[in-house]
């Protein structure tokens, strides 16, 4: 019986999930950049920040449909109340309109506007981007010296954006792994760098060992 290598299986599964997520709908607005939500065991954001991020993405998508309509292709990704905008819009005026609209959404802390002024990408490009996202996540999982679920990965036209609350070591390691993936044109770090002490405070507390005498 033919055996499947665990790493190869994982990369294939993540890539397929990423493509399915990216191609599941034809709407010009894509809410959220993560494809690993079902596999996340812990999150370094507070529960309030996680809820705010979900609300920000939904409210932003609704407002952009009203103001931008079907002009362009805009991805909205919020992490710890920081919003990353990727995709394409036809004019510089539209680019500024999107940023202004998003900045006015409740609970938005800051906006990183990476929208390009150009025609919308084709389905083949978006499929390639989704594949890269899955492969980056798989590399992080396979590396075992980094918490893959600490990062949110967004890919647009071969540029990979990394979001998350991570230490400098984690940021550098994730960048190294991402650059090793075939097809990655550049890596953009939209990261919140925290100290090792901050990281320890975000990790789940282990129960204290029992001091009861053994029977």
Image: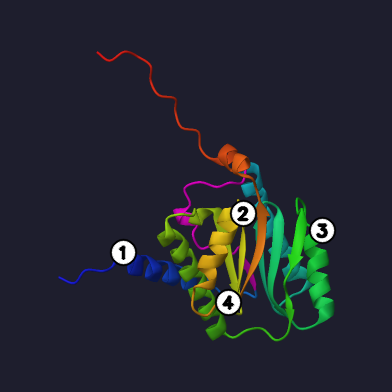
Q: Nearer the viewer, residue 57 or 148?
A: 148
Secondary structure under tag 2 reads helix
Rendered residue at 74%/75% (across/down): 69
Neighbours of disc 3 within 10 Å: few (<14), some (14-19), many (20+): few
- Of badges 2 and 1, nearer the viewer stands 2
Chain-order first, disc 4 or disc 2: 4
Picture layout, residue 177 above or below residue 41: below
Q: Which residue is mark 2?
A: 168
Q: Which residue is mark 1?
A: 6
Secondary structure under tag 1 reads helix
Q: CA distance from mark 3 to mark 1?
A: 45 Å
Magenta stretch bounds:
29-46
Picture layout, residue 13 above or below residue 70: above
Q: Are marks 2 and 1 in contact (CB under 8 Å)?
A: no
Q: Which residue is mark 3?
A: 104
Chain-order first, disc 3 or disc 2: 3
Q: Which residue is mark 4?
A: 26
Q: Quadrant of residue 201?
A: top right
């Amino acid at each position: 019986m033919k055996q499947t290598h665990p790493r190869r299986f994982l990369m294939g599964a993540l890539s397929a999930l990423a493509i399915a997520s990216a191609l599941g709908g034809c709407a010009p607005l894509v809410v959220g950049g993560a494809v690993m939500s079902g596999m996340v065991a812990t999150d370094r954001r507070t529960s309030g920040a996680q809820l705010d991020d979900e609300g920000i993405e939904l409210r932003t998508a609704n407002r952009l449909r009203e103001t931008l309509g079907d002009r362009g292709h805009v991805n909205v990704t919020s992490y710890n109340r920081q919003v990353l905008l990727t995709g394409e819009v036809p004019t510089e005026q539209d680019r500024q309109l999107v940023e202004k609209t998003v900045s006015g959404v409740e609970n938005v802390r800051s906006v990183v506007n990476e929208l390009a002024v150009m025609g919308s990408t084709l389905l083949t490009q978006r499929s390639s981007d989704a594949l890269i996202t899955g492969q980056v996540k798989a590399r992080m999982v396979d590396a075992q010296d980094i918490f893959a679920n600490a990062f949110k990965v967004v890919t647009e036209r071969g540029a990979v954006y990394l979001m998350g609350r991570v230490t400098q070591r984690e940021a550098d390691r994730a960048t190294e792994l991402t650059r090793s993936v075939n097809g990655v044109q550049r890596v953009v770090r939209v990261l919140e760098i925290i100290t090792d002490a901050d990281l320890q405070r975000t990790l789940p507390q282990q129960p204290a060992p029992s001091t009861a005498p053994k029977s």
